[in-house]
Amino acid sequence: MSNCRIGVYVCHCGSNIAGKVRVDEVARYAKDYAPDEVVISREYKYMCSDPGQDLIKKDIKEFNLNRIVVASCSPLMHEKTFRNATADGGINPFFFQMANIREHVSWVTEDENAATEKAKALLIAAIHRVMHHEALEKRTVHINPQVLIVGGGIAGITAALQIADAGNKVFLVEKSPSIGGHMAQLDKTFPTLDCSACILTPKMTSVGQHPNITLMTYSEVQEVNGYVGNFKVKVLRKAKSVDHEKCTGCGVCTQKCPMKAPNEFELNMAPRKAIYTPFPQAVPNKPVIDKTICTYYKNGRCKACEKFCGPGAILFDEQDRIEEIEVGSIILATGYDLKTAESLPEYGFGRYPNVFTAFEFERLVNSSGPTGGKIVTREGKEPKSIGILHCIGSRDKKYCEYCSRVCCMYALKFSHLIKEKYHDCEVYQFYIDMRCFGKGYEEFYNRLLKEGVNFVRGKVAEITDAALEPSEEGKLIMRAEDTMIGTVRRIPVDMAILCLAMVAKPEAKELSHIFSCSVGKDGWFTEKHPKLAPVSTASDGIFIAGACQGPKDIPDTVAQAGAAAAEVLNLIQRGEVEAEVVTADIEEDLCSGCRTCVELCPYTAITYNAEKKKSEINGALCKGCGTCVGACPSGAAYQRNFRDEQIYAEIKGILAV
Amino acid sequence: MISEIKKYCRELLDSKKVDAIIGVSEEEGQWMPFLFTESSQLDKLFVDKKYPLMTTSKPMKENILSYIQRKHPGMKLAIVARGCDERAIFELVKRGQVKLENLEIIGYACDRRQAETCTCPTPHPTKNLKFGEKAEGVKEHKLAAEFDKMSLEEKSRFWHKQFSKCIKCYGCRNACPVCFCKTCLMEAHFYTQPGELPVEYPTFHFVQRYHHAAQCIECGECELACPMDIPLRLMSQPLLRQTKELYDYVPGMDPEQECPLFTIKQERAEEASDELF
Amino acid sequence: MSDKGFEPRIVAFLCNWCSYTGADLAGTSRLKYPANVRTIRVMCSGRIDPLFIISALQKGADGVLIGGCHIGDCHYQKGNYSARRRAAITETMLESLGIDPRRFRLEWVSASEGPKYAEVITDFTRQIKELGPNPLKKGAAK
Ligand code: SF4
Ligand code: SF4
Ligand code: FES
């Protein structure tokens, strides 16, 4: 192109390049190849040094250059450096192209001739390409300081308090009627044995009272639009049928309500009412009406709660509604589930009444639980022997290949709690191997070894009630291979506790679509980098904390929540972030509205405008992968700095030598 | 058959079930697409001659159906369609060019003779067959057996010879009922040297073949249009076979079915696997 | 039909985040591989239009390589899914044109797989040498 005035610079990089590539020959070749466009072609010892960069700046002035090509190291190394030099010289930094003749040529090639030829080809490609470059502008986006946190377990609570304490507005969305999450169901926490509720409840209360936190319980995120700094979020506020502004939380409605249902918080081991607060320390400590049970919603009669409610807070007509909020960053702290015990039929849960899940047992030992803290069988009897089964569903190729990380420790905790209450009860731990990796964990294990617990190294393969001997009559028999002594043992117990695998929430996949982040093969959210960016996701401005990323104990969860909060505060502090420049766009005139591109965009940045019959790219959402561009049959979609003509020019140039 | 179709169309128009019918008309030996709005015009309706009804017409820069749907939104339309017309409509629906709302497809089957002329594997509408008997389709291109036996070198030589005949008339593209871009990449300077003949082999032809890899409805129009008798469909058929094998996808069969090149839903659902194909 | 002394030219389209970085790593590790490959950087393998491939072949490349992140590792999450679908079609397309589909390769090379990159290039170069010059090159055909 005749109006191009290109400056070409071939770097020696000391002997790194010049030792293998005949740089003078390459520089001369460029000039001879395109004498009209290449105004000046130089070689220089270190282009990235200050004098090297000054050379570019000086030449731009002196020779009135409008394009710069540097053949040196990898663009991943110094593209920024030379772009800046180009800009300092007074031309748009995108009128620059780099040829990688170090990493891709001199360092990997044996033969000097071959290296020189290859360097020429890459340089000529860059020269062809730069002729088609265009000026591009840097963009920044503003960060809205409001934050959305999804999930009101210990992770969400911790992050919310840290961000709110720093003076920022937080929306905390929780699906159930109260925050607290799984931690609220636990009795004691290992290894320190402090009471879970005692350390959690004050935090829950702070969340409830915090002026910067808007608590949205009984709510779910339905839709997220936008991009880092500027998300628009639709939250479904399910009808609570109780006006929480008016309600004083006196609880008389709950007393008067005649309808009962199993209480999920107690793992269905105790009843609750149709109008209920899930547990006594709930935040908010105000009830909701479960419409599926309430007789008023079913057949129009009752209204007992309304009659007795002093402040008149009952709102039978309340409808689900959508609330829209705007936030700049999002933390996902949606937690985990335990694998359902029914999915492992070999352990007889449901078939044998005295097979308990770990959570059931937590409630059983909890003094506010359904038995007031008494460990009893489902028949109400005191068990004389209890088996605790590790790794149920975990570390098992058939179910979950991973280790759930917490079971060994809470299994030990269970043993301790049982021994505390019934000193004579025989407790058996069936384990594959003990994983006590945390601070104070191994010590806790050693302590338990002295408490008279039986450790059987072997995984229980099956629970059965088929007695072979009189001593097994009426008991649950644990069949396990004791790998210490190498025999299969049958151990009869009165009660069995399944330490079930921690699994990803079933809705995680759907959430990953809503929040445009991804889940791995086990359904846990994928972090941006497993080591260096453990709480970031592939979507800027969206972070993850706690067990939604993978099995974790409470200390790790809290630490991660803190890290996510710090990431968010960092964004807020900065106030704006630089946006991707090499984004895609669609030439309206050329677009035929075929929608090929729409589905393919990983960031749902493309929408179809039905009125215009054209597709449109939201530049703020586009990250610049170019997938749409590679797919567009009409040549309507283009990517900045990676336009078709630029790449074709590069192909042409690279094959010209 | 024609009289039955006419009768049916007359009823549709007279009863005001539809406002207009798109079909081919014949006047003084000239065929052209026609918008029948009065039943009196139906004498001119013609179905015997194959006509690329859904093709993008040059002056309108779009096909007749999308043109009318755009100009007269809400107009209740019917279209007299062969199997290939129906398939074209379905493909164009997937690409947002035409709508099925307010559109009745009056499908009729072609006979075996017509199927042979077009080398048409499905000479009848699959969803809207109203008139005529299904005839058996022609599954294989007349040169397929010979072509499939060729070695790579022979194929390469074969195409060199074939494409050296190309006079760059754009006939294959112009006749294609599933081509719809506003500007065609076959004309882009980085694929085709302006003014050069024969065209740069094989980019010129690759453009259209690749774009229709999972879109070609095998109507045969391109080959019928090519004045130099280049057997273009020999190039598309392996692609169609492949999309059928890999994704169980046949273009033009179902407007709901997503083109496998437009979607990665399956991958989203699948566990990540590194396998190449 | 391997030509003695035939030095093929291979064009490699590499995604910025994995394969290009992997190629850089091969360099920083001073691994040696044949000089026949010439790289073109794109942001993601999803950017690559099969028409690039045919165009490179038509302009005289003897082989074309696409390098992308491993499935599931794409910097943009899903770009390489599209690349994979297109590559399947490209192969068939080449074959039906009478171009040996072995002249085209799709490989997943991660940022840490410098050695793999060197191996891929070595192997691909060897293969292209075996296949001989690209018959599409102007004047190559009778
Ligand atoms: S370049 Fe990638 S991120 Fe941007 S709109 Fe296209 S497909 Fe989406
Ligand atoms: S693929 Fe191209 S022509 Fe089709 S909608 Fe997208 S930008 Fe428009
Ligand atoms: S970024 Fe490497 S394949 Fe998408």
Image (cartoon, coloured by chain):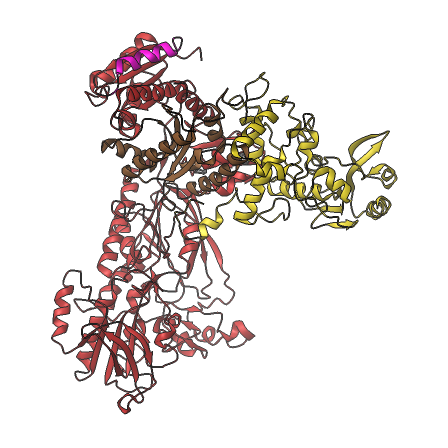
Chain colours: A red, B yellow, C brown
Q: Is residue C68 left or right of residue A452?
A: right
Report the magenta residues as a range. Answer: A20-37
User: Is residue C50 shown above or below C59?
Assistant: below
Considering depth in this image, is A550 or A241 the residue closer to the camera?
A: A550
Observer able to see residue B66: yes
Residue B10: x %, y % from top left: 85, 45
Residue A110: x %, y % from top left: 25, 25
> In the picture, which quadrant includes the C terminus of chain A?
top left
**Mainly helix, strand or loop, the magenta region?**
helix
Considering depth in this image, is A544 or C71 the residue closer to the camera?
A: C71
User: Is residue A108 shown above or below A195?
Assistant: above
Residue B253: x %, y % from top left: 64, 47
Count of numbered circles on the image: 0
Q: Is residue B87 left or right of residue A158?
A: right
User: Is residue A224 shown above or below C5?
Assistant: below
Considering depth in this image, is A600 or B220 the residue closer to the camera?
A: B220
* Residue B36 falls within the magenta-colored stretch: no
Observer able to see residue C17: no
Residue at figure coordinates x 53%, y 71% from the top left: A297
Residue B275: x %, y % from top left: 41, 47
Q: Quadrant of residue A342?
A: bottom left
* Residue A24 falls within the magenta-colored stretch: yes
Q: Is residue A333 left or right of residue C57?
A: left
Q: Quadrant of residue B148?
A: top right
